[in-house]
Image (spheres, rainbow, N blue to C red):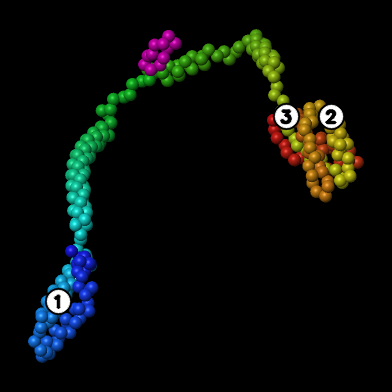
């Protein structure tokens, strides 16, 4: 029971005037006042009740202080204690799992160390064998000769005497050369050569020749903003040359109301050049001031 509940159940403060009167008489009796009457006896009982009530209040206040001090000192409550116990149990489980993982890693490390030792031993054996083979090159067996396929699908080993045979064949060919040949053989060789040249020329004539072409973009500039651009374009398109084909055109503003004619064309490189185009177009001096090549691309 807390102090607030205890004070709620007591009713001593509702009779405060009577308790005050009894307290006054008590002090008067202590100072040598006359012997107490029946009323004094009743007052004494009230005073005893007051004393007991004070004692109970002091006890309740002391208990309240102790609880507050215990909470301020950091003593955990039962719920906190249960949470702390759960945390301890979970940490113990995590610690056990960590220990088991560490043991597994140790076993895996041991197995890896064994594998590394085996590999080192095998590598040392290979190094010893290589050193032995390097010291005794005569013991190495010669590589087999490469196989040469026949036209019927069978293969045979190529012999090492092939260079000797080749030299012998060359010597035989030199022996067959006749240094004092007749003129008839020269005439036949010339006829055969002429016939082959004629056949080559015929084959070459039958092949289609590739014509090199280029795409050109021209900028044709007038004298001023009063120039008739329609007439200017007619003058440009009136230039007709073998290997020239005019394309699309448009008017591009330059400034101050002046517009230039931008026209494209396709030309054959062997027949038409940019110099020829500029020379032919600039002949129309009444309309055209200058001609510039804006773009030139091979097709």
Residue 212: mark in rendering? none
Q: Give the residue drawn at x 26%, y 32%.
A: 133
Q: Give the residue drawn at x 21%, y 49%.
A: 90
Residue that mark 2 sits on:
240
Whether residue 115 is visible to the viewer of this picture, yes or no, is yes
The spot of residue 252 in percent (x, y) is 78, 42
**Is residue 223 rendered to the left or right of residue 120?**
right
Residue that mark 1 sits on:
46
Give me the C-alpha separation between circle 3 and circle 2.
Answer: 17 Å
Residue that mark 3 sits on:
213
SS assignment at label 3: strand
Q: Earlier in the sequence, mark 3 or mark 1?
A: 1
Whether residue 201 is visible to the viewer of this picture, yes or no, is no
Q: Which residues are magenta?
A: 147-157
**Residue extending farthest left:** 35
Whether label 3 touches label 2, CB < 8 Å = no
The spot of residue 241 in percent (x, y) is 83, 29
Q: Give the residue drawn at x 49%, y 17%.
A: 170
**Is residue 254 rendered to the left or right of residue 159?**
right
């Amino acid at each position: 029971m807390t102090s607030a509940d205890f004070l709620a159940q007591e009713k001593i403060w509702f009779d405060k005037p009577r308790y005050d009167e009894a307290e006054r008489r008590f002090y008067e009796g202590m100072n040598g006042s006359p012997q107490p009457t029946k009323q004094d006896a009743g007052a004494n009982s009230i005073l005893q009740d007051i004393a007991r009530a004070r004692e109970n209040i002091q006890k309740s206040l002391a208990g309240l202080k102790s609880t507050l001090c215990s909470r301020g000192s950091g003593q955990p409550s039962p719920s906190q204690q249960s949470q702390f116990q759960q945390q301890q149990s979970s940490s113990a489980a995590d610690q056990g799992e960590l220990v088991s993982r560490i043991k597994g890693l140790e076993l895996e490390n041991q197995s890896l160390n064994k594998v590394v030792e085996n590999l080192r031993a095998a590598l040392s054996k290979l190094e010893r064998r290589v050193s032995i083979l390097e010291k005794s090159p005569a013991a190495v067996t010669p590589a087999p000769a490469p196989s040469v396929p026949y036209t019927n699908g069978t293969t045979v080993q190529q012999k090492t005497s092939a260079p000797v045979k080749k030299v012998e064949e060359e010597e035989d060919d030199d022996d067959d050369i006749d240094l004092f040949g007749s003129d008839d053989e020269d005439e036949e060789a010339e006829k055969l050569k002429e016939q082959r040249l004629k056949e080559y020329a015929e084959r070459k004539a039958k092949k289609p020749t590739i014509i090199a072409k280029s795409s050109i973009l021209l900028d044709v500039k007038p004298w001023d903003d009063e120039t008739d651009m329609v007439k200017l374009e007619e003058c440009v398109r009136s230039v007709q040359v073998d290997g020239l084909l005019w394309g699309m055109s448009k008017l591009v503003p330059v400034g101050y109301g002046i517009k230039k004619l931008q026209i494209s064309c396709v030309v054959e490189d062997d027949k038409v050049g940019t110099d020829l185009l500029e020379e032919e177009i600039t002949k129309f001096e009444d309309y055209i001031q200058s001609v510039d090549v804006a773009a030139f691309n091979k097709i």
